[in-house]
Structures are given as structure tokens and as C-alpha cells.
Image: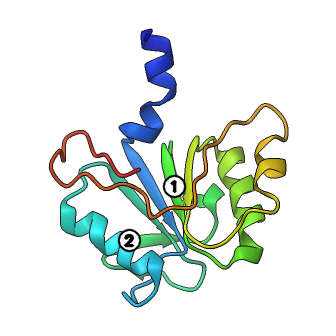
Amino acid sequence: MSGEILEEFASIFYPKSHAVIGTSAQVRKFGGRFLRALLSFGYVGKLYAMNPRESQVLGLETYHRVGDIPGTVDSASIAVPAQAVPGIVEECLTKGIKALAHFLGYHERRDAVLSQGSKRGLTADCTGRVDGFDKERGDIL
């Protein structure tokens, strides 16, 4: 495989920054459990938490909208109610986030949202992939 192709997939397999959208300090909620797992495993990349009702979650500053997150975000996990997913996916694609994983049921509009324009995204109904053995690579999806 050429280096160019591998670079395209770097945000999926080697993200240097990751946003957990819909995070919560409550570990009974999926976004809270996932963020806590990333912190517990020692993810070395830059982590961003997004929750419009909190100013801080698990010691991280929270952002109210995807567009408020500073800098580049390689990947994002989406843990919000299904009706909010289309808008969040559009915000992520506008921000340039290429790797998206969503955790709640959402199939109906996924392909339509992702096929709009020249933006590219990857989605999967999964809980992501956490590699607790290679913290330098920071594999989370």
C-alpha cells in the first residue's frame, strides 16, 4: 500500500486527537464510560469532551458545539440520542473530522449525510476499538 493511502486511514487507526461527543460525568451513560475508558487506558493523544450542559467532565474542559473545539480533530465518538446524530455528523464533517463512530441506533440517514458534498467520513455502529497496549499509537477506533 502506498504511503498516501495509509495516510488517508491514519485518522482511523492512529488518531492524534479524539472528541467524545455526548460525554457525561455519569458513567452509567455511554459517553461517560467511553471517556473514562480512554483516560484510564492512558490515551496519549489530545482528548476533547463535548457536552452543551457542562463546563467540565472528568477533568476536561467541555465544548458546546463541534465547531467550538480548537484545532484539528482526527476522530470522534458520537454518543447522543439518535435524533441529534444527523446534525452532529454534519458538524463533524464541516470540522473536517474523517473518522466517526456512533454508538446509538442510527441507520436511516447515515449514507445520505455522508454522501453530501466532497466530505468524507467513516461510521460504524460499534463501541470503537481501544488498544490499551500501544499508548504511543493511540489506537481508539
The residue at which mark 2 appears reads as 34
In the image, 77 versus 109, the foreground residue is 109
Residue at (84% x, 35% y) in the render: 117
Q: Position of residue 13 (x, y in %)?
A: 39, 38
Residue nearest the viewer, comparing 77 with 94: 77
Is 109 positioned to the left or the right of 139 in the image? right
Question: At which x and y percent is residue 108?
Answer: 81, 63
At x 36%, y 42%, the residue is 16
Q: For mark 1, give the secondary structure.
A: strand
**Quadrant in the picture for residue 129:** bottom left
- Compared to 77, does 55 lie above or below? below
Three-letter code, disc 2: Phe
Q: How is the image coloured?
A: rainbow
- Please identify the quarter of the rendering in which residue 84 is found: bottom right
In the picture, which quadrant includes the N terminus?
top left
Residue that carries the numbered disc 1 in the rendered image: 76
Q: For the point 65% across and 46% down, which residue is it?
A: 95
